[in-house]
Image: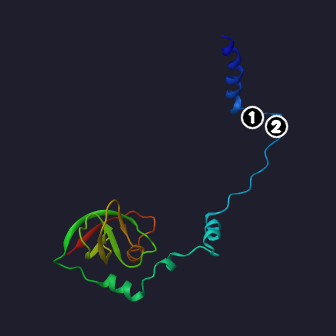
Amino acid sequence: MRVLLLLAPLLILGACSGVSNPFRAAPAERPAPATTTSTASAVVGQSAARSVESYDLTSEAERQRALSTPADAGADQLGQVVVALGNAAEPGFWLRSSLVKQPQKGRVETAGGQSVAVDLLPGAGSAQLSLAAYRALGLGLTDLPQITVYGG
């Protein structure tokens, strides 16, 4: 019983932690957190964030070739898959997907009919499409579009 009487005030005080104390001075304003860009540039030693264009290292000729490659009538439809943006530092036009069993040339097409030639690479987990292919198809970098994959 004595233990209970000794613990009761502690329990009551613990319940009061959410109540503001009128006798305590107002806390000083905290400084605004540093932005991600300034933190990243301090860590990497760069003065500014890189643009999307600086990551896409494909030439204009490569873009035109990928966009103008005609659809092969004999190409097999491997299936449809929802894609996310892949590693932006990995150049070229490629799709990494579990629909692909071995590396091969192929093509991807959006629901809107935009099409681009890509290297099809085997992958596990979620499908990833290269930055260059995303840009060539006119997709937003945060889009998760469903595409049709053709190969063979």
Residue that appears at 67% across and 23% down? 11
Q: Which mark is residue 24?
A: 2
Q: 83 above or below 59?
A: above
Residue 24 appears in the rendering? yes
Q: 152 above or below 83?
A: below
Residue that appears at 77% across and 51% down? 29
Cβ–Cβ below 8 Å for labels 2 and 1? yes
Q: Which mark is residue 124?
A: none
Element carrying mark 1? loop
Residue 4: name its quadrant.
Answer: top right
The C terminus lies in which quarter of the figure?
Answer: bottom left
Left-right relation of 21 to 134: right
> How packed is label 1: few (under 14 Cα within 10 Å), some, or many (20 or more)?
few
Q: 10 above or below 141?
A: above
Q: Using the numbered discs, state the Cα–Cα distance from disc 2 to disc 1 in whole angstroms.
A: 8 Å
Q: Residue furthest top?
A: 1
Residue that appears at 65% across and 68% down? 38
Tell me residue 98's x, y (percent).
28, 63
**Front-lying residue, 104 or 138:** 104
Q: Which mark is residue 20?
A: 1
Q: Residue furthest bottom?
A: 61
Tell me residue 126's x, y (percent).
35, 60
